[in-house]
Image (tube, rainbow, N blue to C red):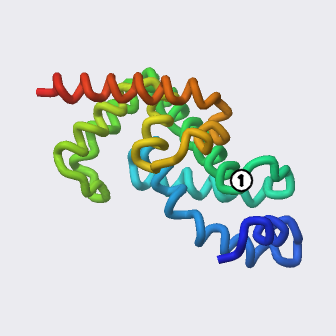
Amino acid sequence: MIDEITLIDQLQQSTTKEVAFKSLVSQYKERLYWHIRKIVISHEDSDDVLQNTFIKVYKNINQFKRDSKLFSWMYRIATNEAITFINKKAKEKNIHISDYQLQITSTLDSDYWFSGDEIQLILQKAIATLPQKQQLVFNMKYFDEMKYEEISEILDTSVGALKASYHIAAKKIEHFIKNYN
């Protein structure tokens, strides 16, 4: 595994860009896939958004200013791509984004790629009821076990605001699960 500074240098040089990009994809595709999957829910859609994310990374790597970690920058791109994707899907169906997310979450139990049990399904339904920002914060903190400082860098939000969002999200999820039939 190449250290981040060397990888960025190689990505920003035309002679080493292709090989470095293959290394980047290999190194980060799984983590980015699961981050995207938590937002867009569907496996097929997640693959599409992941591909779009890597295309953007490839095209814009020379604009990467190194003022954050490379992974944080890619995570931000993946998050924006996923949000844009679900907003577009909701708009196509002419429904509110929260209704769209509840709709796609309700199909999880028939999704071949979903391997969770009933409580995980209920948890996903609970998460889908949260406002988008709370969903992101909850997923990044709870599932990805990211530190608030990392989430702050990705979402460009203060640590205090993230802690409040996570606390509120956890309470809403707890309430949803307690009241779920």
Residue visible at 88% across and 77% down? 15
Measuring from the top left, give residue 111's x and y in whole percent: 27, 52
- Residue 141 seen in this snapshot: yes
Front in this rendered view, residue 48 or 83 = 83
Residue located at (70% from left, 49% from top):
73
Q: Residue at x 27, y 45 (%)?
A: 108
Q: Is residue 116 left or right of residue 30?
A: left
Q: Quadrant of residue 62?
A: bottom right
Residue 36 in view here: no
In terms of depth relative to the viewer, which is nearer, 97 or 122?
Answer: 122
Q: The N terminus lies in which quarter of the figure?
A: bottom right
The answer to whether residue 166 is left or right of residue 19 is left
| Residue at 79% from the left image edge and 66% from the top image edge | 5
> Badge 1 is on which residue?
69
Q: Residues within 10 Å of mark 1 (few under 14, many from 20)?
A: some
Secondary element at tag 1: loop
Q: Which amino acid is tagged 1?
A: Lys
Picture coordinates of residue 46, whole percent (x, y) = 48, 52
Q: Is residue 69 above or below residue 98?
A: below
Q: Position of residue 22 (x, y in %)?
A: 67, 74
The one nearer the camera, 108 or 170, is 170
In the rendered image, the quadrant that contains the C terminus is: top left
- Indicate the position of residue 124 as horizontal and vertical percent values: 31, 39
